[in-house]
Amino acid sequence: MLTTIVNSARGRRAATLLALATGLTLLLAACGGNGGNAGGSSASTGGPVSKCGLGNGKKATGTPVKLGAIVTKQPGTDFTPITGMAQAYFSCVNDNGGINGRPIQYIVDQEQSDPQQVRADAVDLIQNQGILAMVGNTSLIDCSVNNSYYQQQGFYVIGASIEDQCHTSPNYATVNMGPNYSTQGAVQYVVSQGAKKVVIDAANVPGGAAEVHFGIEYAQEKGLATHLFLDDVPITDASGIALRDVQEAGPNGAVVLNFTPPEGLKIVEAAEQQGLIDRVKWGWSTPGNDASVAQALDTPWNGKLGINAELSLVTAKGPDTALYRQVQKKYAPSIALGSFSEMGFVAAEIVTKALLQLPPDQLTKDGVNTAIRNIKDFKTDILCKPWYYGNLPYHVPNNTDLTVTPVNHVMTQKQGCFEIAALPDNNLAAIRAAEVSQHLNTA
Amino acid sequence: MLGLALGGVFAVSGVGMVVLYRATGVLNLAYGAIGALGSLIAWSMINVFLLPDWLSYLVAVVFGGVASLLYGLLIGPPLAGRDPLVKAVGTLGFLLILLGVMDWVWTDKAHALILPTTQWGFQVSEVTVNVTQILAVGLAVVITAVTEVFLRVTRLGAAMRALANDREATAMLGVPVRRVEAAAWLGSGLIAGATGLLLSTLVGLDAVTLTFLVIAALSAALVARLQSLPVTLVAGFVIGVLQSLVTPFSLVSSYRSITPFVVAIVALLWFARRRPVVLR
Amino acid sequence: MGAPPSSDGSRAPARPLPGAGVERRTVAEGAGVAVFLALALFGVPALRNGYWELVLQTSAIYTIVALSLALLLGRVGMISLGQVALLAIGGWIALRLGFATTMPFLVVVFVTGLITGVLGTLIGLPALRLSGLHLALITLMFAAAITLLLEATQFPNGGGGFLGHSVLTTAPSVLHRPGFASDDAAYYRLVVVATGLMFLLVVAHVRSRAGRAWAAIRQSEAAALAAGVNVTLYKLWALALASFMTGVAGGLLAASGGGLTVYQFPTQNSIILLAVVLMGGIFSLWGPVVAGLLFEALPALLRTWGLPADLLTILFGLGVLQVQLTAAAGLASQVPRDLARLARLLGGAMGRRRGQELPG
Amino acid sequence: MIEISDLTVRFGGVTPIDGVSLRFPGGTCGLIGPNGAGKTTLFNVLSGFVSPTSGSVRAFGDDLLAMPHYRRARWGLRRTFQTEQAIEALSVFDNVAMVHEHTGGRRSRRRREVLDAIGLVGLEVDPGELVGTLGARERRLVEIARAVVGEPRVVLLDEPAAGLPEEETEHLGRMIRRIPGERGALVVLVDHDMSLVSACCEITAVLDFGHLIASGPTPEVLRDERVRRAYLGTEEEL
């Protein structure tokens, strides 16, 4: 759900992303998970809860197993809830037998979007600190800056993505799918609702057009007319923008937004005031999946705004989601429940499982990264389908997601898990073929 | 109207800076940072200490005055005889200190401070106008008018205007220079605090953004050659409207936030087109 | 206050002017430079610490930018609050040339310096008519405008058209390194050598006819004119030289680890750069070295120690105030003297303020 | 020889020089007048910092006003300032050498001519000394050395004795008297010290409120009733 808008004015981007993270906390979740989470065990409240690592309650001692991460934290953009939650999960693992007795030491470098700094941080972690794996990397620029270095060092990173570069490397795999695929998901939703023309309205920020091009391509593949508007943020003329979007879409059209919650909210609220809700289908990429949005929208919007969601609702009932809530409560109460921390949790869970399966003498840089690359069929109820790494030139392991919608001020599920469609440019056809041929998530 | 609201923001910031510059010769580049810190304090009072809104807003405005006054009392006098550039660079130091404190204490988390006036709005044709926007325009006009009257009618105001011309001569005439300067620091700081509150609603409560918005707001003051309040006001509105007029032209639309800087550069060059050799 | 009010903003803070001369370079100082260079060139790579190599490489690049700012400010008396924006322009040009042509790396960097020199001079033309506060403001406005322009255009990444940026390419904006310096250690050495050459360039200028003309311009344009100095020409020359060096730094930065993004050149970095250059000292040639270290290496050190980087912003702010208040010549020339001055300032602040009611 | 005809300078409502016609034939000439009489403004017109509203200035047959200001130094016009402007950041030698190199002095002769000028003004300091470390008297002398180095044709001295003690002024006067002979330059001296002016200058012109009120041989001018009245009006001692 880490769809973000890479924005020049860091403040705005920040506000958005944070609202996105904190918002979900507040969800009072009527029936979040409706059993729609494929691949996970569906269970009712009070049902089974997963365990951290070995789950034996013994404190790990001895030489630590070092893991590292690079995460953006700068005025306006703070991805540290992701690494913070990963740290919380590792603490829980260390209290439950660690990696076959050895504790995990998690070293997180915070960066401020300076490529030289991000590059130096990677060198520091890998060469000076001697980490065995990179887990939970979430950065505005890490993928593009360090892809080649990770490749050269034989590191297979598990992170979360904003940039497209995170999905075009053999050495980088993320637990989310990023803004480009997410916007496509939102477009798929409105098309499935019968839209005949798709208007995409996105923030006029660096990379703003690139972030939505899969969405446009999908609509065009379907033979639909499209139109792209890029609007300056912060939005000062929401009414005019809402009206313009709806008029451009025309009858039976759809408007898909790619904005941070406060900015997108201005447009949908203006649409409500002007009575435009029912004139088109409305879609929004992942940032719209936010409690602030759900709370702000009144009942006329019930079920009428389809928001793409990359991970399960934090209120869902699967055993992993339950453990996630428990770990948050015990180890990281200051970190909000939300998609950010969910991503950190899943990344930490994946690597822990891989480490536990290694014999002690394989706990080396090469051993661990080989194990990561060999991850297949990792099942969790937080994701729609099992996660995998695999030997691929590019990675989008999370390529199936759901649609949520606000109902009576609460985010609820609108559409169960569906595949993000393969397009000539989005690599998904090749990825799905490899999933089958390498049995990555079809065990 | 939207351009006017934005212009009001430029204008009101510009007016605060011009008042101080006229009285003390200091161009306070930390002006935006003072307002931002005040707003963050108000945010904490409301959201962390759960204090009443009105009190928090009051504290934000008063903080602006006090912070500005403190700087004026501590750093102003030792730099008083120096070049305007030295004084301005000094305020850059103040800016960095305030910015560091804000990033440190309030970390990088997003904050939002929405004045209640934002919720009251009405429709003008197809555009919704909220009261905060009207407040921005109104505040700009009112502060300009009040300050202008103050400078012309009151004794303190007359002293400030005299100071702008010649500090030493004014001091010799028996004007308590330091007290007048302190009043200017306090007054401009109060305006900074109030502007900060408006800006955190209109633009967003973010330390870096608010701190450096001062650069854009300077353009209005520069068009007025850092001297005339009415010209600053009008220039602020013109720049704001200009910027929103550019929006529909998609070719230049994405460059529209450059408007204030272009205006300022043109103004500076225009005023500098004939420059005598500076003799000491 | 001791310093007389001066109408010429470009004047140095107070007399006597500190540390004017490279002319008075002693043997000991020469030896110091040699030892420093040897350490930088061979000592650092010998540590085999890739992290510090990268950090110091960036420090060296920013040392060049600091040197250009110190040249303008300390030697000619022209202030620039837009030097980091100019660095970004240099980076953009280098990437554009790098993607569009097959010129060898060193040629790309050199040509980048030349083009940036021309552009910087054009941007700096107002400096011929403005000085002091107004020059500072117009350069700040230019910096803000350039930053916004770059955010709209992005850095070239191999795309087509004049802007060379493709939204569909996922390639980063990196300039290819030369074959002889493809690994980090070799590239670090290349950067150190380039930085050294920039210092030589500045020393050669300061000791020449140009340096003497600049010294006159800095103190008093009237005196310079009366002495027959073509003030316009020498100001342009200083702008061109400073912009050239900044352009070279931009080219070097474009090929450093990670390439360039539009986020790394915010307007406030120009302000922070001014702060560290003032702290390092604008009169001594060691000043820019100190400034480069303050700007890049000190944050890395704080990160290593786990201290918040925000402390640095506060420190830089205090540094600027201290330099302005005491008219100090920066850390490089006189750490001990500064400390003594600071003590005196603290002691004398009260008395001085009481005396301030009196004119003069 | 300098020939000033009908020179008027106006700044807004102020007219610091009002229709002045004046001739400095050669040697050392004095230019006196109470404060605000227009002496420094006249120097500024000559050195190009102020453009006159009307009038002309010819020096040794050349139209001075037609030259860009920095070119005038190369032509041979030199000046000192009321507040001395020796360049603090440079050494004594470089201060003088700077003028030499920017006024077309030959490089091969630079060292000799610079040291010569330093010797002429009687500066007894190490030429490598930084000007910033010198005292007020030495700085004045450095500035005068800069005015006489190379091949000056006109040397304008603006209150060179200001702030100097009496015995220094006498030394200064002796030195100024040597300039026309040793350099072949016309010297125009502005000063309030009448003993210096009468010691140095054969002829003197007097300005008051922008008007020329007297000119001629110095002793006669100093006895002139209008001159005495002009000074008495400002309560300045003659």
Image (cartoon, coloured by chain):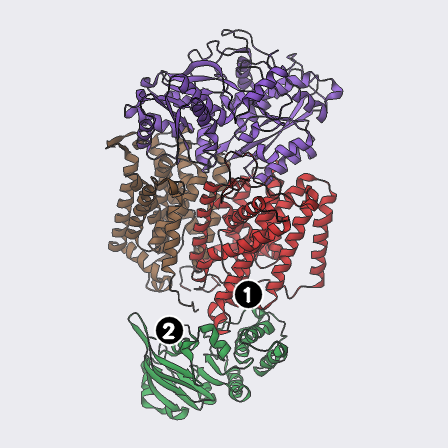
**What residue is rendered at 60% in x and 67% in y?**
C208
Question: Vertical placement of C91 versus A86: above or below?
Answer: below
Chain B, chosen colour in render: brown
- What is the crowding at mark 2: few (fewer than 14 residues within 10 Å), some, or many (at least 20)? some
Question: Vertical placement of A226 versus C166: above or below?
Answer: above
In front here: D89 or C44?
C44
Amino acid type, residue under disc 2 in the picture: Ser
Q: Where is residue C260 in the image (x, y as percent from the top left)?
A: 56, 41
Question: Residue reaching furthest front?
Answer: A223
Chain D, chosen colour in render: green
Label 1 SS: loop
Are circles 2 and 1 on residues that touch, CB within 8 Å? Answer: no
Which quadrant of the figure contains the C terminus of chain A? top right
Question: Vertical placement of A365 versus C139: above or below?
Answer: above
The residue that mark 2 highlights is D51
The residue that mark 1 highlights is C16
- What is the crowding at mark 1: few (fewer than 14 residues within 10 Å), some, or many (at least 20)? some
Closer mark to the observer between disc 2 and disc 1: 2
Q: Where is residue B236 in the image (x, y as percent from the top left)?
A: 32, 47
Label 2 SS: loop
In front here: C314 or B71?
C314
Task: Kindly indicate which chain is depicted in red in the rendered structure.
Answer: C
Asked whether the viewer can see residue B164, the reply is yes
Asked whether the viewer can see residue A331, the reply is no
Tally of marks:
2
Amino acid type, residue under disc 1 in the picture: Pro
Which of the 4 quarters of the picture holds residue A29? top left
Which of the 4 quarters of the picture holds residue C305? top right
In the drawing, does residue A282 fall left or right of residue A416?
A: left
Q: Which chain carries label 2?
A: D
Chain A, chosen colour in render: purple
Q: Where is residue C296 in the image (x, y as percent from the top left)?
A: 59, 44
